Image (cartoon, rainbow, N blue to C red):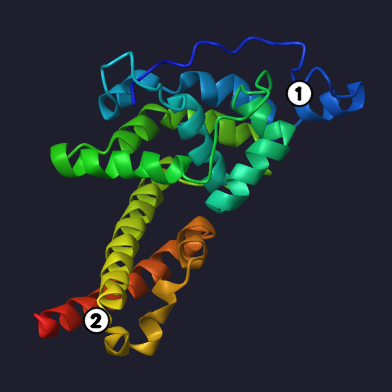
Amino acid sequence: MSFKPNQNQQITLHDSFINQTPRTQKMIMNSWCKDFADIVFPAINEERFSVLYSCNSASRPNTPVNFTVGSLILKENNGLTDDELVESICCDVRYQYALHTTHLKEQPVSDRTFSRFRERLYNYEMETGRNLLEEEMMHLADVYDKYMNLNSNIKRMDSLMIASRCKRMSRLEIIYQSTSNAIRLIHRLGNEELIAADLMHYLNEDDYNRAIYYCKSDDVMPRLEKALQEAEKVKELMSDES
C-alpha cells in the first residue's frame, strides 16, 4: 500500500452537506464538527505517517491519513467503539463534515481500517522506538486545546491519552490474535479436550468483534489484563504439550 496525501476535497453535486436542508446545514455549522473541520483536521501532518507505507506509487493508495487520525480523535472524544465510529462516519453528516468527506459518495472506511492503522503504528514503534501518533498529538496539542475550549460539550481529554489508548488497543489486538491462533491450532489438531472452558470463546466466529471491534476505550485495560491472563494459560498448555 502506497502513501498518497489527501488533496482532493472538492465539493460535488452529490455533496452530503449541500444537499441538506438550510435548517440542518445551520445546525451542522453551529455544532462541534465545524470547529473540528476548521481547526483540527487541517493541522494533521500526513507526511509524518508516510514511513508506514510503500514508496511504490503503482500500489494501492492508503486510506487518507488525516481522515484516519481525525477519526481516531473523534472516537476518543465521543467514547465510541470502532463499530460505532464506522457507523457514525457512514451515516452522520457531522462526522463527514468534520473529516472533509461530504463530497464522497462512499466513505473511505471499513471494519478493519483502524485496526490496520494501529497495527502499522505499533509495528513501526517496535522497530524504531518512535510513537508517531504521540508525536502527532504533541504537534496538535495547541490546536487541540483551542478546539476543546470552543467545544465544552465534547468530552475533554488529554491529547496524549489518544495515542496511549491507541497503543493499548494495538496490544490487545495482537495478544488476542496470537491467543486465538493458538487455540484454533489446538482445536484443528483434534485436542479440543485440552482447551479450558474459559478459553472456548476464542473458537466463536463472532468473538473477535465482541473483544475488539465493539470495545470502548474505557474497556481496553480490563480486556487487556484478561487477554494477558488467557495468553499465559495457553502458553502453559502448549509448553506442557511440547
- Residue found at the very far left of the displayed protein: 242
Query: Of marks 2 and 1, which one's residue comes earlier in the chain?
Result: 1
Tell me the crowding category of disc 1: few under 14, some 14 to 19, or many 20 or more residues within 10 angstroms, Cα based: some
Q: Nearer the viewer, residue 166 or 234?
A: 234
Residue drawn at point x = 83 percent, y = 24 percent: 25
Could you tell whether 116 is left or right of 186 in the image? right
Residue 37: x, y in percent?
Answer: 61, 23
Residue 143: x, y in percent?
Answer: 49, 26
| Residue 20 visible somewhere in the drawing | yes
Residue 161: x, y in percent?
Answer: 41, 48
Q: Secondary structure at mark 1?
A: loop
Mark 2 — residue?
A: 233
To which quarter of the image does residue 96 belong? top right
How many marks on residues?
A: 2
To which quarter of the image does residue 90 belong? top right
Disc 2 marks a residue whose amino acid type is: Lys
Residue drawn at point x = 48 percent, y = 33 percent: 68
Residue 81, above or below 127:
below
Residue 157, above or below 235:
above
Residue 91: x, y in percent?
Answer: 72, 39
Q: Circles 2 and 1: CB distance less than 8 Å?
A: no
Q: Secondary structure at mark 2?
A: helix
Residue drawn at point x = 27 percent, y = 44 percent: 122
Residue 82's tag is none
| Residue 152 visible somewhere in the drawing | no
Q: Give how far apart the Cα atoms at labels 2 and 1 are.
A: 50 Å
To which quarter of the image does residue 222 belong? bottom left
Mark 1 — residue?
A: 16
Q: Nearer the viewer, residue 40 or 94?
A: 94
Disc 1 marks a residue whose amino acid type is: Ser
Could you tell whether 106 is left or right of 47 in the image? right
